[in-house]
Amino acid sequence: MHDGPTAPTEAIVHSPSPSTRSIDEAHERALEQRRITSGPIAVLTRLRTFESLQYRDFLLIWLGQIGNSHAQWMDQITRGYLMYQLTGSPLELGTVNAARALPLLFFSVIAGAVADRQGRKMQLIVAQTTNMVLNAILATLVVTHLVQPWHVYLTAVLAGCVQAFQQPARQSMLSDLVPMRRIRNAVALNAMVINVARGLGPALAGLLIAWVGAGGSYALQALLFAMSALWTIQVQEPAHRLRGGAGGAGTPGELSILRSTAEGARYIWGDPTVRAIMLIVLVPSVLGQPYTSLLPVFAVDILHVGASGQGVLLAAAGVGALLGAIIVASLGNAGRQGLLMLAGAMVFGFSIVGFASSTWFPLSLVLMAINGLCNDSYNTQAQSLLQQHTPAELRGRVMGVYLMNRGTAPLGALLVGALASAIGAPHAIAIMGSCCALLAVWAFVSRPQIRALG
């Protein structure tokens, strides 16, 4: 499955021992004993799309994700509105969004090491509780008319730090809560919640702001985070089943945070399969996904549909992403995940090139929907492959690196903005989309072990 033996790979790759297999088998038996076999949930899980919800602890995490995702998308709209209301500055509007996103770039890797070292459930509960407190404070400041721009900046940075620690813990828990044969379905159901929240969260925030103001929106966000924490508290997290660190360095609990982080980096770099999947995820997050920051240029100057047309374009991408999550969740154990991931990444890049060239609004809508579908589906396939390929004791660190893609988007937005200023928005987006597509083609041609992954 690898390109060939290398010194780092030999030092890192784990061969499951008989005792490890025994632990894994016992873990799967425990999951089966906690399956939901009656009631509405059991009926729903007869559909392949929702089959992972039959596992009680995954259901609890999934319900928590519903509240968590809606609160985060509500915050993105409410925080921008509040900052613009306080300052009237478009620059500060962009800066506060960057302040919330950049901690994901800097802390996700360390957060993954902490999750492997200290326990994923507790890290997730602490993060959700902290988010609840931050939102309650901000709601109080808004309602009492004491809020200042620095309050919005400070809570944005803290919320970004909390999200950086929350995401690796949540994602690496998924493979502990469902059998590995269900991991693709579980990851896709998780993505489905995020995509629904992407549409409903901002709409709900807008209604609350119009009705009761930004303070009411933040109060509801605090309540949603509290509910998510309560769902998570009920999860019975299994033992980590640690097998010892790479190269005999010891378990994460025996290593310092920095050494644990370095061990995760060595594993990712030393395993050709994991390294290639990471490239396919992280490079498009910088070169491909930030094209949405230039949508106003296309909506106004090229497609001539204005702000309402821009909203429709974003809605098309959201519908495509939701459809992608549903399709992946419904695939079950169909296999060919590696091939599907590469195909999705290729079409993602080519759809961006097509969008950059389009001057016809209906065609642009179709390309946005295809882009959203492929973006979600190939990322979901990539995450499930990483979970399957990575030893249990390293999954938090690998997921921490994977989730850096959410922090690199602001860097990509700066890059595409600078390039668009020099050569125009259509050419800038076409170049960056071409790079994404060529990367996927390179992986398809030169990494047969990726194509073969099931």
Image (cartoon, rainbow, N blue to C red):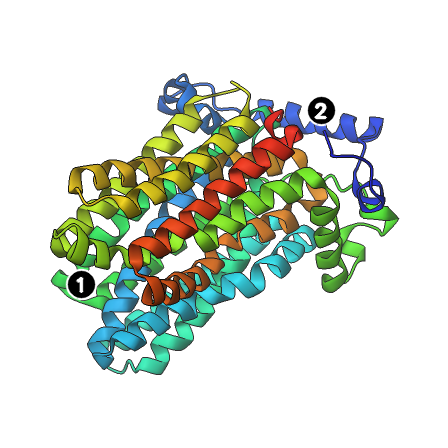
Residue at x 40%, y 36% (from the top left corner):
374
Residue that numbered label 2 is attached to:
25
Indicate the amino acid at tag 2.
Glu
x, y (%) of residue 174?
55, 38
156 or 293, nearer to the observer: 293
* Residue 396 percent coordinates (x, y): 63, 48
Q: Nearer the viewer, residue 94 or 20?
A: 94
Q: Does any portion of residue 146 appear in the rendered image?
A: yes
Q: Which residue is mark 1?
A: 209
Q: Quadrant of the N terminus?
A: top right
Q: How many marks?
A: 2
Extreme residue toward the right, this view: 248
Query: Residue at coordinates 53% horizontally, 51% vertically from top-left?
Result: 403
Q: Position of residue 101 (x, y in %)?
A: 44, 64
| Residue at figure coordinates x 43%, y 27% from the top left | 329
Q: Earlier in the sequence, mark 1 or mark 2?
A: 2
Could you tell whether 138 is left or right of 182 in the image?
Answer: left
Indicate whether 307 appears above or below 366: below
Residue neighbourhood size for the residue with mark 2, other residues' Cα within 10 Å, grouped as few (<14), some (14–19), many (≥20): few
